[in-house]
Image (cartoon, helix red, strand yellow):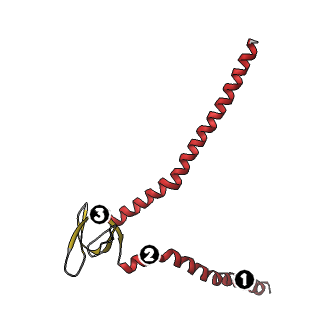
Amino acid sequence: MIQIAYADTAATTTAASGGMGSTILMIVLMIAIFYFLMIRPENKRKKQAEEMRNSLKKGDWLTTIGGVYGRVVAITDRTVVIETSEDRVRVEFLKSAIGQVGTLDEQAAAQQRPVGKKDKKADETPAVEEKTSEEPAETTAEEKTDAE
């Protein structure tokens, strides 16, 4: 009877350790998924925004995250002074408050580019297919000429 009790304990311990390993594996898998779907893309966006803010120069047009639009007049390490109107109204903002760089037309075009690219690709696809269908025919004609 005592031997049976020890055998049952060993089987339970083995099953529990197998379940523990799969639980740890699932936790590691979830962390990896969160990293690649949430953390990594956010870090890329932050890096791009920081590069954009560091590449500012006098004369650039920008829009702040609050919607103020103006031309850069002065830049320091932490702040940017922009001129917002023809009356020479100057306002100082932190660099972190800059949302987009470029004229309003450029900013609007940048926001609409993904839609435009899809339409252009759809329009260009038949032209590319026609060229590829012609290329083998030309190659065949050249091969026939070489064969003769």
Frontmost of labels 1 and 3 is 3
Q: Are marks 1 and 3 in contact (CB under 8 Å)?
A: no
Is 84 positioned to the left or the right of 20 in the image? left
Amino acid at dot 1: Thr
Indicate the amino acid at tag 3. Answer: Lys
Q: Residue at x 42, y 77 (%)?
A: 108
Q: Dividing the picture into quarters, in which one does residue 119 lie?
A: bottom right
Residue at the image position 69 percent from the left and 25 percent from the top:
12
Q: Which residue is the site of mark 2?
A: 110
Q: Return the residue found at the far right.
A: 148
Tell me the residue that label 1 is attached to.
Answer: 139
Report x, y in % for residue 138: 71, 86
Picture quarter containing residue 69? Answer: bottom left
Residue 78: % across, % down: 25, 60
Question: How far is disc 1 from disc 3 in space, using C-alphas?
Answer: 58 Å
Q: What residue is disc 3 on? A: 95
Q: Residues within 10 Å of mark 3 (few under 14, many from 20)?
A: many
| Residue 103 percent location from the top left of the image | 35, 78
Residue 69 visible (yes or no)? yes
Pointer 2 or 1: first along the chain: 2
Name the side, left or right, on which 148 lies relative to 114. Answer: right
Position in image of residue 145 (x %, y %): 76, 87
On the question of residue 54 being in view, the answer is no
Q: Residue at x 68, y 27 (%)?
A: 14
Instruction: Identify the image quadrant of the C terminus.
Output: bottom right
- In the picture, measured across the screen, residue 134 lies left or right of residue 82, that is right
Question: SS of the residue at dot 1?
Answer: helix
Q: Quarter-wise, where is residue 1 in the image? A: top right
Residue kind at label 2, given as amino acid type: Ala
Q: Residue furthest front?
A: 66
Q: Residues within 10 Å of mark 1 (few under 14, many from 20)?
A: few
Mark 2 or 1, which is nearer the eye?
2
